Image (cartoon, helix red, strand yellow):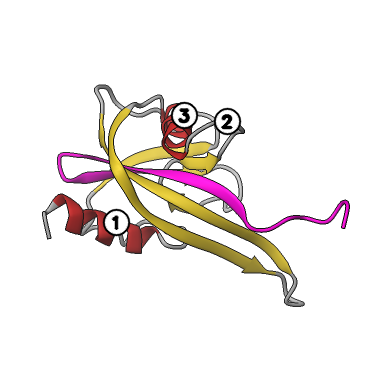
């Protein structure tokens, strides 16, 4: 019907690594306060990898060399009555950071290079821990 929200929506994220650490951003917008990979929506006419590169640049000022698709992840939320409020399918791309240091821009409140074995201080967005584990397997050649 006209005016109804159409789900799912397609999004991307950039799982970017440097020297064994992964780049995380603290979300400035919902889910505010949670840590995730830089990412967001896909614009019409944009490939998924182009969208991941654009979102990375918009949120951190960084570039990356992408090695391919890390995985597809669902983000689904319901309100207290059970009504679907969010359903995104996120295509996460694995990459190696380009030169420079990240700066919090756009939707990012702050940025950090995180050691994957020391994530206890981060409130991670859904699927981020699983995506980090998958990335480590790929990067380690497992």
Q: From the image, tell me which residue sits under label 1.
A: 132
Q: Which residues are magenta?
A: 1-25
Residue 45's tag is 2
* Vertical placement of residue 3 versus 51, above or below: below
Q: Secondary structure at mark 1?
A: helix
**Separation of residues labelled 3 and 2 (CA atoms):** 13 Å
* Vertical placement of residue 111 versus 100, above or below: below
Asked if residue 133 lies left or right of residue 46, the reply is left
Q: Residue at x 77, y 55 (%)?
A: 5
Asked if one can make out residue 123 in the rendered structure from this viewpoint, the answer is no
Closer to the chain start, of discs 1 and 2, is: 2
Quarter residue 56 falls in: top left
> In front: 140, or 116?
140
Q: Secondary structure at mark 3?
A: helix
Q: Residue at x 61, y 33 (%)?
A: 44
Asked if one can make out residue 68 in the rendered structure from this viewpoint, the answer is yes
Residue 98 lies, in percent from the top left, at 26, 26
Q: From the image, tell me which residue sits under label 3.
A: 54
């Amino acid at each position: 019907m006209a005016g109804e929200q159409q789900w799912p929506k397609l999004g991307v994220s950039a799982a970017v690594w440097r020297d064994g650490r992964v780049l995380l951003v603290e979300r400035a917008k919902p889910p505010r306060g949670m840590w995730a990979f830089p990412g967001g929506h896909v614009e019409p006419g944009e490939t998924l990898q182009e969208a991941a590169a654009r979102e990375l640049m918009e949120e951190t000022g960084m570039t990356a060399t992408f090695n391919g698709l890390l995985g597809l992840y669902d983000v689904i939320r319901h309100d207290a009555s059970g009504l679907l409020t969010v359903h995104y399918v996120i295509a996460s791309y694995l990459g190696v950071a380009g030169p420079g240091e990240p700066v919090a821009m756009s939707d990012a409140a702050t940025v950090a290079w995180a050691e994957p074995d020391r994530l206890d201080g981060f409130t991670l967005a859904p699927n981020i821990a699983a995506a980090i584990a998958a990335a480590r397997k790929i990067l380690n050649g497992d």
